[in-house]
Image (spheres, grey):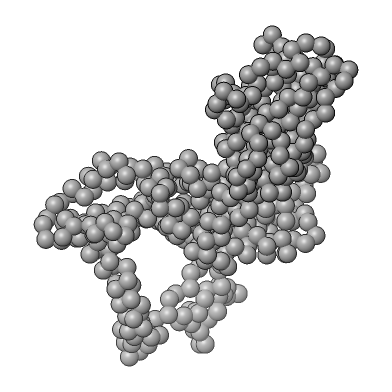
């Protein structure tokens, strides 16, 4: 009779040797047993605790103790002597300035992470299709090498109101001036006396007496500093049209530096006002429009004989376009969010690009072979496969924006900082920035911790799932 063997046997017997695998794939391997002396194999748990003890001490000193002390301190008033319970937490939702910080944090959480994630996705996809992808990624990632403090200083200069200093307004002003002239003379006006040939009506400058075709019209103005026109051409008298079918004149600054000169007459030292829009009116209707030359002269050609009122519209006397008030109350929060996006978009691109490189190319090529367009491949395949990475990037950005402090503190001027305030900055201002109320500051710190904690737990759970 043939004896059947199901696995390795011990010498001299039919049973497998102790600790030897049975040979079956579904048979688990037994854990290593203690040695015959009853000792556990490997290092002692006491030794592991000894090595972990320094890290545990640092964790307790830097994380656990501050949290516990902040909870305790938030239950007391500004002096720390009187127990107030939850009054500091109630003040968070009743004080108008604190409600503004919560509103700004909501805007940050909704806008900034979404834009950073979307831009990171777009950059990651596009860099796969360009030749100098590494250089492009390096340029986009470079802001991460700059501290948020330095980034705040950079964008404080970028958002300067003066186009000669602020890059943003310099670009906007150039684009605006390309399509619309920004020439203006704010403050210019005629003299307020009976001898003045013109007067102000509804913001516009209008001649007092109707002008006849073929006769020069003089419109002297004051109210401008001669230094502003130091590069302007000298004013000249417009020649009359002997045929009587045209109307001409001069608009100039009737001021001589140092005094002197003849009122309502063109002197050699006086400057012409270039770029002034001039209208000829008859019967209350505009019959013709022209513009002054560099020497202040203007001319209407082919006007029929008759009397006309010459008007300089109000638009000539409005301030020239000098860009957008980025650091004003209305745009300060979007401006700071723009700086944040500049810093973090490259970071999001690198993470998403790493996830994009792990996508199987067979699925993308199969979709293209089946006739899918690039947009369909991107929307139906790339984005769903990248969803875990996009979610991690988005949640990480949410945690970051809830703690944003440096950019708001540096970019926002002191006059508009209350409109740009966020919880982290308010916590510092209340505790150390002049408020002197560490009870309220501790309550804000705990409130901020409660906001951040769910997103941190979510991220940690995702990381653990990915490791499995």
Q: Position of residue 417 (x, y in %)?
A: 40, 50
Left of 108 or right of it: where is 120? right
Where residue 39 sits, quadrant-wise, is bottom left
Residue 72, position as x, y percentages in the image: 19, 60
Task: Using the rendered image of the protein, determine whether residue 196 is visible from the camera's viewpoint.
Answer: yes
Q: Residue at x 24, y 54 (%)?
A: 440
Quarter residue 66 falls in: bottom left
Q: Nearer the viewer, residue 72 or 146?
A: 146
- Is residue 291 visible in the rendered image? The answer is no
441 is higher (above) or lower (below) than 289: below
Closer to the camera in the image, 350 or 390: 350
Q: Position of residue 359 (x, y in %)?
A: 67, 55
Q: Residue drawn 48% across and 44% down?
A: 328
- Residue at far top of view: 283
- Left or right? Give the position of 256 relative to 83: right
Q: Is residue 409 above or below residue 97?
A: below
| Location of residue 240 by image quarter | top right
The residue closer to the viewer here, 212 or 128, is 212
Q: Nearer the viewer, residue 239 or 402?
A: 239
């Amino acid at each position: 009779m043939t004896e059947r063997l199901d696995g390795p046997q011990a010498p001299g017997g039919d049973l497998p040797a102790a600790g030897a695998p049975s040979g079956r794939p579904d048979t688990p391997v037994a854990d290593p047993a203690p040695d015959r002396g009853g000792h556990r194999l490997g290092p002692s748990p006491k030794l592991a605790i000894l090595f972990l003890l320094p890290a545990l001490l640092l964790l307790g000193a830097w994380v656990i103790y501050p949290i516990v002390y902040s909870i305790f301190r938030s239950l007391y008033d500004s002096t720390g002597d009187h127990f107030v319970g939850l009054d500091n937490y109630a003040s968070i939702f009743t004080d108008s300035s604190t409600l503004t910080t919560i509103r700004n944090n909501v805007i940050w959480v909704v806008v900034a992470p979404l834009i950073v994630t979307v831009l990171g996705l777009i950059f990651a996809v596009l860099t796969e299709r360009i030749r100098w992808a590494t250089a492009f990624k390096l340029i986009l990632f470079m802001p991460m090498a700059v501290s948020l403090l330095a980034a705040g200083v950079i964008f404080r200069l970028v958002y300067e109101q003066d186009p000669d200093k602020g890059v943003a307004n310099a670009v906007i002003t150039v684009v605006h001036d390309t399509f619309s002239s920004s020439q203006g003379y704010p403050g210019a006006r005629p003299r307020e006396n009976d001898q003045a040939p013109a007067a102000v009506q509804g913001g516009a400058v209008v001649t007092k007496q109707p002008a006849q075709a073929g006769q020069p019209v003089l419109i002297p103005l004051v109210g401008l500093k001669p230094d502003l026109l130091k590069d302007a051409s000298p004013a000249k008298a417009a020649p009359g049209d002997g045929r009587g079918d045209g109307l001409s004149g001069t608009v100039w600054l009737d001021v001589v530096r140092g005094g002197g000169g003849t009122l309502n007459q063109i002197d050699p030292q006086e400057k012409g006002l270039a770029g002034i829009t001039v209208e000829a009116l008859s019967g209350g209707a505009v019959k013709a429009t022209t513009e002054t030359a560099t020497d202040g002269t203007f001319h209407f050609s082919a006007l029929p004989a008759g009397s006309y009122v010459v008007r300089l519209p109000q638009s000539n006397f409005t301030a020239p376009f000098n860009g957008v008030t980025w650091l004003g109350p209305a745009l300060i929060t979007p401006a700071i969010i723009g700086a944040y996006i500049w810093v973090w978009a490259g970071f999001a691109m690198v993470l998403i690009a790493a996830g994009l490189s792990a996508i199987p190319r067979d699925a993308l090529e199969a979709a293209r072979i089946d006739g899918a367009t690039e947009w369909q491949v991107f929307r139906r395949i790339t984005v769903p496969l990248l969803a875990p990475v996009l979610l991690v990037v988005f949640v990480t950005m949410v945690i970051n924006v809830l703690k944003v402090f440096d950019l708001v503190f540096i970019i926002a001027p002191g006059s508009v900082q209350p409109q740009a305030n966020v919880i982290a900055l308010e916590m510092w201002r209340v505790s150390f920035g002049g408020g002197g109320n560490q009870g309220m500051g501790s309550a804000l710190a705990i409130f901020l911790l409660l906001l951040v904690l769910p997103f941190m737990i979510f991220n940690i759970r995702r990381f653990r799932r990915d490791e499995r």
